[in-house]
Each structure stands twice: as C-alpha cells, then as structure tokens.
Image (cartoon, helix red, strand yellow):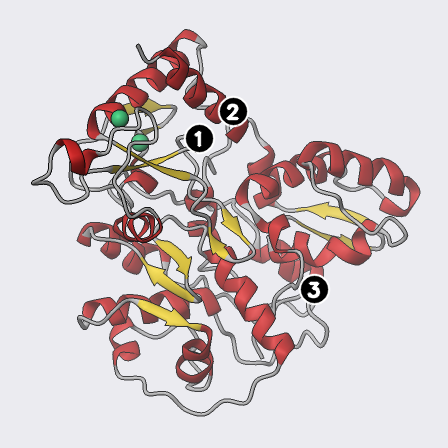
C-alpha cells in the first residue's frame, strides 16, 4: 500500500517546509521532551502555523511530516536533522524554490519508507512519485491528455504494480485493473499528489493532476535526469535508512535554466552560481491561462482595469497571466490543489511595467528576490497606486 501523511498538507508547502527546516536544524541532536514548549514556540513563530493541538507533543503529531518531507527523524528521543533540512535552512540554500527541492526528492522517496509502521526492507521497492510522473510523460508522448485522477493512479499505476523503475515507454501500454481501496488510502494519495504538484510542471485542477509543460527539452531533462530512482539497498535500521535517503553529500543536481523555462526571451540574470530567468515559472503556464479564462470571462486588466476586448475588438482574450508570489516561487498549493489566488490577468503593457517596477524595487533594495509573499504583494499594490 502506498502511504503518506494525512491532514497536515499545508505544512508541506515549500515555504513552510523551509521555515520548519530552520527550526529543526537549530534543535538538531536535542532531546525534544526536555524542551517541548520552546520547540513548539519556535516552530509556531518561524512558520506561522499552529502546530496544534497543544495537549499532544509536537513529535506525536508532526514527526511524520518531518520524515515524509525528508527534514528530520527521531532516535532515542533526540531530533536528527537531515542533509535536506540543513540545506533548506541555509540562507543561501541551493534549494531556492520548490522545483529544486522536489527534483532532488522525487527520485529518492520510496517504499518501504522508514517513517511508517511495519517498515520491512524485504518489501518491493517502489518510487511512487517517479511512477506518477513517468505515467504522465507517457500520456503526453502518446498524444493523450497528460492528466490523471486519483482513480487512474490506483487502477493503472498501483494495480499494475508499477515501481517507478520502469522505462517511460513501459507506461504507455498500461491498462486499468480493478483495485480495492479505502478512504484512508485515498486521502493519503490525494495529499501526495497535491504535495508533488508544487513542481512547476504540475498542477492540480478539478480533481486531476496535470503535466503542464510545453517545452520538449524541459520534459527530457525531467524524464532522463530527475526520474531515475536512486536505488541503493535499504538499511534494516530505520534511522540509518532515513539518513541514507536524505543524504546530499554526492552533491545536489539542479535543473538547468531550460528545464521549466519557455523558449521565449525572459529577463535573465545571474544569481549566485546559476543563471535564472525572471518569473517564467508560472506566467508561462498554458494551463493556468486556461483556468483563469474560465473564471474571468472578460479580459479586464487587474492593474489598469482596461477591458482589452472592448479596446481591441478583433483580439481574443489578450491578457497575460501574472504571478503575484515572489519570483522564485512556484504556485502555492491549497488543500484543494493549485491556487488561482496567486495569479492576475494583466494587459501586456501593464505586465511589462510591473516587471520593470519589480526589477527597480529589488535593485533599490539590494535584493535578488522578494523575501516573502507579503512583500511581493505590497510592491505590486504600490505599483498600482503609482499609475499616472
Ligand atoms: Zn493594464
Ligand atoms: Zn508576470
């Protein structure tokens, strides 16, 4: 059975995981029972999440979150922070966004997983996220609609005993088989799917997980470098196995610029060791454009209120989709899936102008990127006020 965590999905948002990591790295090696209150308070103040209920220890309710997210485990009551945790906690982390983190995660997470009861190293190894992504790529390559519902995952991927180790073409020939599931398993799979949808090439919409990528080289890089499972023999000892799975000493493989970028010219800048294109991750999503159009029938610019269809009656919905979150973020997830609250439609002129405003603001403040969602939002609103 595929397993995960349940009911704490919002703790798995990349920005929250990053702030959890800061706290866990500080408490590394500490016996949590001796400092329960300060541990909980540090988590609450760093993340803004409740870590409730107060009458249970944090570890009782959140240990599985920490483990499933590859952040930390517990041995003899002591917190053991992982390499993933230490990397995420760094100010100049290599994991600058959800893609960086998840692309290092998806080919490592496997069953049997040491966080779960009945951990048994003799069970068949399954890389669930590799299997789901390979199936989506297979659908796209065979010309189908690259989306899966939960039932498809049960009946096609799980019922056919896919392990994630197979070649992509293997996934093209799968046919559904009946599979008896229960509510717990459904909820857990649903949360796995929403977690992984933080990858910028995935979106959850209308109960389906969609592969949202138009660029072939991006697809190739995903398929041939990030979906190759790291398949060493599992360790009998849970803590050793956890440490092995989350080890980053062999170096972190990061996507090249092209992975999730479009072919069109974006504003490029050099940040630290690598080149990055500004804002391509979400603004270029054809799927988000489709959703936005479905919920906003009239093409009205969010900044200048121009109805583009009235001004240019020969055009068809000439609005750009703009992402309100910090530049390096992917779209935020909610318990329902992809959030449409993070995007607005802008006329092409306003769109160019807001990115110019961002660039100027960041330069004036000596920053590479916005530090938070709230900061990005404030700057956006300030720009609207300054429109002449
Ligand atoms: Zn406008
Ligand atoms: Zn934009």
Instruction: Pick the residue in front: 1 or 371.
Output: 371
Do we see residue 310 in this rendering? Answer: yes
Which dot, 3 or 1, sits closer to the camera? 1
Q: Which residue is mark 2?
A: 371
N-term mark: 3 or 1: 3
Name the disc covering residue 238, or none: 3
Q: Is mark 3 within 8 Å of ligand 2?
A: no
Q: Earlier in the sequence, mark 2 or mark 3?
A: 3
Quadrant hosting residue 122 = bottom right
Q: Tell me which image quadrant ligand 2 sits in.
A: top left
- Residue 114 at x, y percent in the picture: 66, 66
Residue 215 position (above or below residue 275)? below
Asked if marks 2 and 3 touch (Cβ < 8 Å), the reply is no
Outermost residue to the left: 314
Q: Earlier in the sequence, mark 2 or mark 1?
A: 1
Q: Is 307 on the left or on the right of 201, as rendered?
A: left
Instruction: Indicate the quadrant containing the N terminus: top left, top right, bottom left or bottom right.
Output: bottom right
Distance between the alpha carbons at the discs numbered 3 and 1? 37 Å
Q: Position of residue 108 (x, y in %)?
A: 49, 59
Q: Which residue is mark 1?
A: 326
Mark 2 and 1 residues: CB-CB less than 8 Å, in contact?
yes
């Amino acid at each position: 059975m595929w397993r995960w965590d349940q009911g704490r999905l919002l703790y798995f948002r990349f920005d929250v995981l990053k702030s959890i990591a800061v706290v866990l790295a500080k408490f590394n090696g500490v016996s949590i029972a001796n400092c329960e209150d300060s541990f909980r308070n540090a988590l609450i103040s760093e993340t803004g999440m409740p870590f409730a209920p107060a009458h249970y220890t944090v570890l009782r309710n959140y240990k599985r979150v920490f483990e499933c997210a590859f952040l930390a485990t517990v041995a003899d009551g002591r917190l053991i922070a992982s390499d993933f945790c230490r990397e995420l906690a760094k100010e100049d982390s290599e994991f600058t966004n959800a893609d960086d983190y998840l692309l290092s995660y998806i080919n490592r997470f496997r069953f049997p997983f040491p966080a779960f009861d009945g951990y048994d190293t003799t069970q068949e190894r399954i890389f669930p996220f590799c299997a789901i992504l390979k199936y989506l790529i297979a659908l796209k390559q065979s010309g189908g609609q690259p989306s899966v519902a939960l039932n498809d995952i049960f009946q096609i991927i799980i019922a056919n005993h896919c392990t994630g180790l197979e070649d992509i073409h293997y996934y093209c020939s799968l046919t559904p088989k009946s599979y008896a599931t229960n509510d717990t398993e459904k909820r857990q799979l649903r949360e796995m799917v929403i977690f992984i949808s933080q990858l910028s090439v995935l979106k959850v919409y209308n109960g389906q997980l969609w592969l949202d990528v138009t660029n072939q080289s991006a697809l190739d890089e995903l398929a041939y470098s990030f979906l190759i499972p790291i398949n060493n023999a599992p360790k009998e000892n849970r803590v050793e196995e956890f440490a092995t799975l989350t080890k980053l000493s062999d170096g972190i493989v990061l996507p090249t610029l092209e992975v999730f970028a479009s072919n069109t010219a974006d504003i490029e800048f050099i940040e630290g060791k690598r080149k990055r294109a500004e804002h391509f991750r979400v603004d270029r999503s054809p799927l988000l454009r489709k959703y936005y159009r479905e919920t906003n029938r009239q093409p009205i610019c969010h900044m200048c209120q121009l109805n583009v269809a009235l001004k240019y009656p020969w055009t068809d919905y000439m609005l750009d989709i703009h992402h309100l979150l910090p530049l390096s973020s992917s779209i935020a997830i909610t318990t329902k899936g992809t959030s449409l609250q993070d995007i607005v439609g802008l006329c092409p002129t306003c769109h160019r102008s807001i990115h110019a405003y961002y660039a100027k603001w960041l330069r004036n403040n000596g920053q590479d990127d916005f530090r938070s969602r709230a900061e990005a939002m404030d700057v956006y609103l300030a720009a609207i006020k300054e429109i002449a």
